[in-house]
Image: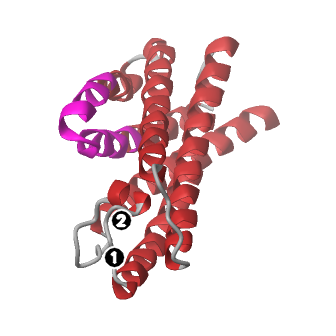
Amino acid sequence: MNQVSSRAALLRSCAVASAVAAACLGALALLPRPPFALDHVRILSGTATLTAEQLEQYRHYLRLNLSVDGVFLLGQVMTWIGYAVVTRSRVLAASIAIIGIGGAGLDLLENEIRWSVAARLADGAATPAIGTLWEVVVGLSFWASYVAALLAAVAIVPFGRAARLASAVGVFGIAAAAARYEFDFLPSFLWLIAWHVVSAQFLAAESKRG
């Protein structure tokens, strides 16, 4: 009985964390941006010349962005843990956890790249090609989410009606992956919000099943 209660409590925590992750993504979209073109690749590579005032505005934006994104990443990790807990196949559960949490690690890495490079720019240092490296890490972090969500979608198919919406959104991540090369990161960003919303609903429903 205690084991069932612990599992339910963990899934409730994961459901709440996933909802918080979705809210954080919405907050990221609404954060006030600096009053100049925000091209991270050019800024991080040093090819976009910012004044001292603009660089401080950029760093202020990063402080807000990375703080909110840090909370999002915690929610994302809990989401993958939730899917690993409900997945019946140990191999599939481990794959979801490893790939999903690995993607969160890549996201954290790209955050640290941005923050570290912004600090070096404030010191007057050049940062050649770092913008390209940052963009590669961002792309890989999204791909980890696509793959982990697809595996989760496959894993929850047997769960019936309650899992259908989450499963469909998980599979749709592949379309978001393809659209990224045409429309940049906006489709992936919107998909991530939807994924965490439906994941919160699914994991909450599973927590009630014990």
In the displayed structure, does residue 150 sit left or right of residue 115? left
Reply above or below: 193 against 170. Answer: below
Dot 1 or dot 2, earlier in sequence:
2
Pick out the residue farthest to the left: 182
In the displayed structure, does residue 67 sit left or right of residue 9? left
In the displayed structure, does residue 175 sit left or right of residue 102? left
Q: Secondary structure at mark 1?
A: loop
Residue type highlighted by circle 1: Leu
Query: Which colouring convention does the figure follow?
Result: secondary structure
Residue type highlighted by circle 2: Ala
Q: Secondary structure at mark 2?
A: helix
Reply above or below: 4 against 19. Answer: above
In the displayed structure, does residue 99 sit left or right of residue 190? right
Reply above or below: 78 against 30. Answer: above
Q: Which mark is residue 27?
A: 2
- 178 in magenta: yes
Counting from the top left corner in percent of width and height, residue 76 is at: 53, 45
Counting from the top left corner in percent of width and height, residue 49 is at: 32, 72
Q: For the residues carrying marks 1 and 2, which lies nearer the camera in this image? A: 1
State the residue position of label 1: 50
Q: Which residues are magenta?
A: 174-196
Residue at x 43%, y 60% (from the top left corner): 44
Residue at x 23%, y 74% (from the top left corner): 36
Q: Which mark is residue 115?
A: none
